[in-house]
Image (cartoon, rainbow, N blue to C red):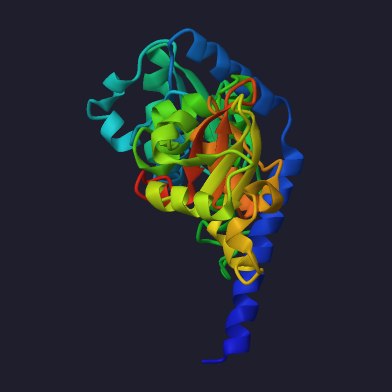
Amino acid sequence: MDRALALEKAREVLDIEIAGIAQIRDSLGDSFLELVETIIDLIKNGGKIVVTGVGKSGHIGKKMAASLASTGSTAIFLHPVEAMHGDLGMIQEGDLLLALSYSGETDELLHVILPAKRLGVKIASFSGNAESSLAKLSDIAVVAPVPREACPFNLAPTTSSTAHLALGDALAVTLMHLRNFTKADYGRLHPSGAIGRAVTMKVTDVMRDSDRMAKVTADATVAETLVKMTEARCGSAIIADAENNLQGIFTDGDFRRIAQTPGIFEKKIGEVMVKNPISIRFDAFAVEILKVVENKSIDDLPVVDADGKVVGLVDIQDLPGLKLM
C-alpha cells in the first residue's frame, strides 16, 4: 500500500467536506431563520418536528431527530415509505415535517409531502437545489448546495450528507440558545450515564461531610494532621479557624515534598499548608467539579457554603465510584 497516497486522498476528502460545510455556513439566511422561528412557536404550542428522509439522508435524519430531541426540541424520525403505510398517524396538525433530500427529487420522499399537507402539517426541507420539486413543495426551503461530493465520481453522498449533518447540529444548538435550554434541562433528558449524573447531581451529593474528612486548626502539628488524614482515609486535610472559615489545605502530596525537613512532624500545619486553596460552593452542580479538577489539576476540593464556611470535601478518588469519571 502506498501510505503517502492513502493519507493524501484521505486529507483531500476532508478538505472537500470542510469546503462544503463552509459554503453552507456562508449561505445561511432568511429561510434558516424562518425555520428556527417556526420551530420555537410550534414547540410552545405543543407541536413536534418530524424528520424524514431516505437512504443516506434517512441516516442523517435519524441523527438530526435524536440531536433535536436530546437538546429540548421535541422531534421524531419518520421513514417516508412506512409513512405511506400507516405511520402518517405519527403526525398531527401543528407539527412540522422536515424533509431531507439533497437532490430534492427523491420519489419516496415526495410522495409523503401532499398527504402530510392535508393533515395540516407545515413542510420544511433541506436540499441542494432551489428549483427541485421538494423545495417548491416546501413552506420553508433551506437550500444548502455544496461545491462537489468527495466521491471521485461526484455521485455518492459524502460532502452533501456531512454538510446536512452539520446543518442539523447548527439548528439544534441554535434552538438550545434561543429557547434558554440549560444544563439542568439537559440532565433531565440524560438521566443515565456520566453526563446525566454530572449535570443533575449537586456537590452536596458527592462530597464527604464532616464525619468523613480530616479537618484541623492551623495550630495542629503535622503529625496530628497526618493521624486525622489516616483516620478519615483521606488524601488531604482541611484547615479552618474556630469559626469554620477555610484557611488552607494540606495533602499527602504536600507532605511527600517536605517529608525530609528536620522536625517536620512537630511543625504547625499552618506553616506548611497551602493557603487560600481553590474551593467550590456546596450548591454547585457536580459538573463544575470535573471542570476544576481538569483545569487546575487538583485531587481534593474543599466545599464551602455561601459564607465561606467549610461544609465538606470532594476527594477525586470518590468520583469513579459515583460514576462521575
Task: Tell me residue 132's x, y (percent).
Answer: 58, 37
Task: Depth check: give the residue in front, 58 or 131.
Answer: 58
Task: Tell me residue 129's x, y (percent).
Answer: 62, 41
Q: Furthest-right residue in view?
A: 26
Q: Furthest-top residue in view?
A: 45
Please report the residue visible at 53 percent of the width from the left and 29 percent of the height from the top.
183
Task: Depth check: give the residue in front, 10 or 289.
Answer: 289
Task: Tell me residue 45's x, y (percent).
Answer: 47, 7
Residue 276 occupies which quadrant of the picture? top right
Q: Is residue 164 visible?
A: no
Please report the residue visible at 52 percent of the width from the left and 49 percent of the height from the top.
225
Q: How many marks?
A: 0
Q: Furthest-left residue in view?
A: 86
Q: Is residue 30 visible?
A: yes
Please report the residue visible at 60 percent of the width from the left and 64 percent of the height from the top.
150
Task: Depth check: give the residue in front, 184 or 69.
Answer: 184
Residue 188 occupies which quadrant of the picture? top left
Q: Is residue 4 above or below residue 48?
A: below
Task: Depth check: give the residue in front, 291 or 258.
Answer: 258
In the rendered structure, the answer to whether residue 311 lies left or right of residue 11 reads left
Task: Tell me residue 325's x, y (percent).
Answer: 44, 50
